[in-house]
Amino acid sequence: MLNNWINTKYLNQKTINKIRNSFKKAKPFSHIALKDFFDNEKLKIIKSELYKENFIHKECDLFNINQTNDLKSSNNKIIKEFYNFFSSKEFTNYINNITGIKIYQKIDMAGLLLQNTGYLLPHDDELEGRKIAYVVNLSEGFKNNNGGSLDLFDSKDNHPKKIVKSIIPIFNTLVLFKVSRISFHQISEVCVAKDRVSIGGWFHG
C-alpha cells in the first residue's frame, strides 16, 4: 500500500534512518518537512475532492480559518480512501519508524483553508493522546512574502518566545512534529489572494 501513495525514495531504509535522525535533532522541537512525499497525481485529485467538502468559517482572537468536520465522516469515496490510508497499520508503522514515536491507528483529520487575512496564532496542540501533528500541504504558488507559513517557536517557561523556523506551504510537502508542552507554532497571516489549503491532524498514542 505504501508504494501506491508514497514517493518510493522515502521507503528506502537508509532514507528512513536519515529522516528519523533529522526529526529527533531538529530545533526548536522534533519536526521534519518532507517535500514531494506523496504521489503527485494522487494528491492533485485529493485536493480537488477536498474542495467538495463543507468548510465552516471560524473566527476569534486566536484564528480566522475555514475548517471541515473530521474527514473520517466524509461521504467522498476518494477522501475516505485517503483517510483509511493514513489510519492504516502499514502507514502508522511507517510514521513510527521515521519519528521513533510509538503511535496507534487512531488519527484526527480535517481540511483547513486560510484565505486572504486568515491566520492561526501560537498554540502548542497539546491534548491527551496526541503524539504527532501532521500537515499535508496542498497550497500552490506560495512564496516567502505571501504569509501562510507554519512558524515554529522557541519557548521559555512554557510560553512561545521567538520564531526560529518558518515552513512555506509548498504543495506535496508532509510536515510532522512532536506534540509537547513546548511545540508552539502558528500559521502566519495570509497576505495574498491565494488559498492556503491543507489536510492535517494528529496521530495518537
Image: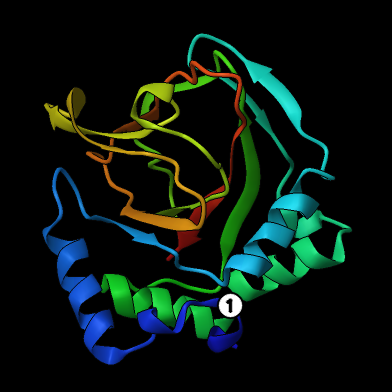
Instruction: Tell me: residue 154, above or below residue 95.
Output: above
| Front residue (pair 152, 156) | 152
Q: Quadrant of the C terminus?
A: bottom left
How busy is the neighbourhood of tag 1: few (under 14 within 10 Å), some, or many (20 plus)?
some
The answer to whether residue 130 shows anywhere in this view is no
Q: Residue at x 55, y 73 (%)?
A: 105
Disc 1: which residue? 5
Q: Residue at x 83, y 37 (%)?
A: 54
| Apparent side of residue 131 relative to residue 87 in the rendered image (left or right) | left
| Apparent side of residue 167 relative to residue 194 in the rendered image (left or right) | left
Q: Quadrant of the N terminus?
A: bottom right
What amino acid type should be assigned to the residue bearing mark 1? Trp
x, y percent for residue 69:
74, 42
Residue 79 in which image quadrant: bottom right
x, y percent for residue 160:
21, 25
Q: Residue at x 78, y 43 (%)?
A: 51
Instruction: Tell me: residue 120, above or below residue 105.
Output: above
x, y percent for residue 176:
37, 56
**Residue furthest out toward the top:** 61
| Apparent side of residue 28 relative to residue 80 in the rendered image (left or right) | left
Q: Residue at x 21, y 55 (%)?
A: 30
